[in-house]
Image: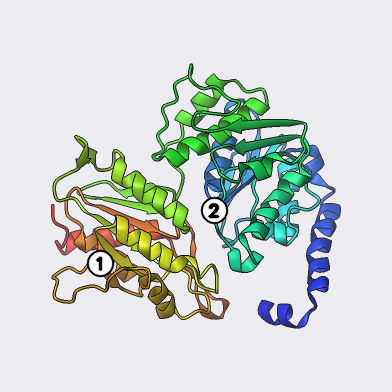
Amino acid sequence: MKNLIKKFIPAFLLDFYHFFLPMFGAFLYRFPSKKLIVIGVTGTNGKSTVVNLATKVLEEANYKVASLSSIKFKIGEKEWPNTLKMTMPGRLKLQKFLREAVNAGCQYAVIEVTSEGIKQHRQRFIDFDIAVFTNLTPEHIESHGSFERYREAKGKLFQACKNIHIINLDDENSDYFLKFSVQKKYTYGWDKGDINTKNTQFKLKLAGDFNIYNALSAICVGLSQGIDLETCKRALEKVEGIPGRMEVVIKKPFKVIVDYAHTPDSLIKVYETIRNSKFQWVAGGWRPNSKMICVLGACGGGRDKWKRPELGRIAEKYCDQIILTNEDPYDENPQYILGQIESGFSQIPNSKLQTPKYEKILNRQEAIRRALSLAKPNDVVIITGKGSEPWMCVEHGKKISWDDREVVKEEFNSLQQVQLVNY
């Protein structure tokens, strides 16, 4: 239905429709953002984690906070999962959320801001006090038309926000975001930027260098609000994990990790983290005979087809065994999607091998079961693409209830019962 509407209604009318809704929503809910300090977090990767961490920092400083990300909604102590299959809700839902935050007595709202949301004016009529830039790599290229237009969409948040900008200097696109005029800027990087944490040792429980950047983002949010480093430290060290982000679902006899990684850059970072982290790193290298077994797919619906072969190339480089499977096909042929990922492999599997380098199993539950059955003690199974998402989107606009983490637990318990798991 949506596609038919887009096909027959002129673009300028659609644009007016997208502009009118947030204006109407803001009016209907009495411009709630004016009574909150609103923080918008944008970038390709890390947005949900930064929203979570920044919320924890503000709460540690005894502020009441509302937050909204692809993972969950939160107003004060009340939390509920984001089941919309949409990171940034529609205009009316977003304004209603902000009004509920005001009514609950919140002082802050931390919002994950997407390029698609900006394209549809969902950020309009929200007074952003702080804009946070995490990083930028190619994503949503088909939707925006080019990487430059994708970047421009992100830039509109910074163009609109005139109070505080927080920018990752280590990203090659930082200069673009630094050019926007603002009252105050906070910058961060591995060994550069405005903040100095050298005299305060942070012991994060989150794995990966990318989470150090996410933490630095949250620290900048805190400092911009007059929150000291010790308070930031207490808050960040309490965070045990982020749902569906490098989440260890099974610990023994092998590890099973679920992560949302769905872009080439995020997939590389996840794989490198596993290869080089405490998960398997012992005495300078892998445990003898340990394997990394990877389950991955790619989103359908015509989304970023260019990255599918690249995901295959990356998986082939880092993984010992690969299971290609369904993710969110929408109306696209799932076999075609897997074929495009497969085209990134340098060679087809040798059918004479007892366990080929990669297999294609369209049913995601069966693919997870297969990966678990291949795992031996000290191996790592990494399942990427969906994280904690509660749905799988298939043809004709249907959504199937789904959670990679629950499927892992179910299949692991099943394999234990039939004694297919080797201890």
Find residue 171 and report its horizontal and vertical position in percent.
Answer: 55, 42
Indicate whether 201 appears above or below 178.
above
Q: Quadrant of the N terminus?
A: bottom right
Residue, x 35% and y 75% (percent of image)?
A: 362
Label 1 residue SS: helix
Indicate whether 367 appears above or below 38.
below
The mark tally for this picture is 2
Q: For label 2, count other residues whose C-alpha is less than 10 Å away and answer few (under 14), some (14-19) or many (20+).
A: some
Front residue (pair 238, 87): 87
Relative placement, left or right, of 290 versus 175 is: left
Front residue (pair 128, 288): 288
Relative placement, left or right, of 246 versus 390 is: left
Q: Are marks 1 and 2 in contact (CB under 8 Å)?
A: no
Front residue (pair 128, 78): 128
The amino acid beneath tag 1 is Arg
Relative placement, left or right, of 371 versus 271 is: left
Q: What numbered label is drawn on residue 362?
A: none
Label 2 residue SS: loop
Which residue occupies the extreme top position in the image?
199
Q: For label 1, count other residues whose C-alpha is less than 10 Å away and answer few (under 14), some (14-19) or many (20+).
A: some
Find residue 196 and report its horizontal and vertical position in percent.
Answer: 54, 22
Front residue (pair 68, 312): 312
Residue, x 50% and y 72% (percent of image)?
A: 300
Find residue 142 and report its horizontal and vertical position in percent.
Answer: 60, 69
Q: Earlier in the sequence, mark 1 or mark 2?
A: 2
Q: Quadrant of residue 18?
A: bottom right
Find residue 418 and report its horizontal and vertical position in percent.
Answer: 16, 64
Q: What residue sits right under mark 1 in the picture?
A: 370
Q: What numbered label is drawn on residue 137?
A: 2
Front disc: 1 or 2: 2
Residue, x 77% and y 35% (percent of image)?
A: 182
Residue, x 56% and y 53% (percent of image)?
A: 70
